[in-house]
Image: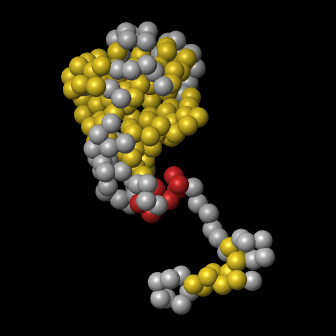
Amino acid sequence: MAIIEDGLGSGKKAGVNDENRFMVHAITESLEYHTNSIEEKAYHLLFQVTPVAEACFVYVKNDNHADIIIKGIQLRTGGDEIIEVHMHAIGTPLGGTETTPVNCNAGTGNDAQGVFLTGSDITGLTINNPIERFYIKGDAGSKYFNFNQDLIIPPNQSITIHAVTGGIEVDGTLVFFFHSKNI
């Protein structure tokens, strides 16, 4: 067995076995749990709007130094609706109401840093093709959608959520956290 010293002068050592693997006793935790319990930077953005057809009804711009990682979204609609998620909106959003995301750790006062708007028709933006599309059966109750690949919104970038049909109430929760790449 080989021994590796930490190189920081603490005298701590790590063992490496004959298969060239570290010998450790480890406790694992999900990145989401760590971000919520230790960093206190996990949030839910709740919304309840009746968007017009082809309208943006949620706008999120990251004003933090860390990335926003969007895990998923919970949706309920009052009728059949198609919901689209777009990234890289260009322009200045007009309309909408500033909405404060709720921190998922009740023991902290950390606020999310960014622009969080909800409304029936947020305009002033040029959008790209959707990155995700959800077909919602109306009055079927709430359904949680996990993004197959977490959506990553770097600093100064944005994400928008749109209703295609419009005129139908949309209730939901956007689930996200902030994460620095240096962990």
Q: Is residue 82 among the parts visible in the rendering?
A: yes
Where is residue 130 drawn, in percent x and y? 45, 21
**Image point (71%, 71%), residue name:** 21
The answer to whether residue 73 is above or below residue 137 is below
Question: Could you tell me residue 35's position as x and y percent?
Answer: 46, 56
Position of 101 compared to 2: left or right? left
Q: Residue at x 56, y 24 (%)?
A: 141
| Residue 176 visible here | no
Q: Position of residue 140 (x, y in %)?
A: 58, 20
Determine the image quadrant of residue 162. Answer: top left
Where is 52 relative to 101, above or below?
A: above
Residue at point 39% right, 35% down?
46
Q: Between 18 and 31, which is closer to the camera in this rendering?
A: 18
Q: Is residue 65 above or below residue 73?
A: below
Residue 50 location, x and y as percent? 36, 17
Quadrant of residue 180 in the image?
Answer: bottom left
**Foreground pick, 158 / 30:** 158
Structure colour scheme: secondary structure
Q: Residue at x 55, y 34 (%)?
A: 147
